[in-house]
Amino acid sequence: MSFWHKLFENEQKNGHKNQVACVENDCSCKSNEQLLEALAKATDEDVIIGIKKVLASRGYSRKELNELQHAPLQ
């Protein structure tokens, strides 16, 4: 793997991590109900990961979050 390939690969990973961190920061002030609703509607993988991290820090299990993500909206 060339130096340039490694350099750009790291930039992509950092960009992904930064986007997830921004979502986490934006979601930290929202209620669990708002986050669960946003999780059910989310399509972007970074947004989904960020919301799941916030909800996991609030006591939701990974299994619960996966079930809620795929549950139909009421």
Image (tube, rainbow, N blue to C red):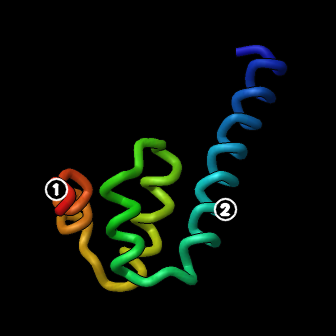
Q: Nearer the viewer, residue 51 or 31?
A: 31
- Give the quarter of the image for residue 3: top right
64 horizontally vs 4: left or right: left
Mark closer to the chain start, 2 or 1: 2
Q: Name the residue type under label 2.
A: Cys
- Residue shown at 40% from the left, 74% from the top: 34
* Disc 2/disc 1 C-alpha distance (Å): 25 Å
What SS does tag 1 mark? loop
Give the quadrant of the C terminus. bottom left
6 up-or-down from 71: above or below: above
**Where residue 37 sits in the image (x, y, percent)?**
34, 66
The residue beneath circle 2 is 22
Q: Are marks 2 and 1 in contact (CB under 8 Å)?
A: no
The quadrant the N terminus occupies is top right
Residue at x 45% of width, y 55% of height:
49
How far across and down, in percent of the image, does residue 32 sit? 37, 81
Q: Position of residue 39 (x, y in %)?
A: 36, 59
How packed is label 2: few (under 14 Cα within 10 Å), some, or many (20 or more)?
A: few
Q: Residue 65 placed where, x, y %?
A: 26, 64
Residue that mark 1 sits on: 71
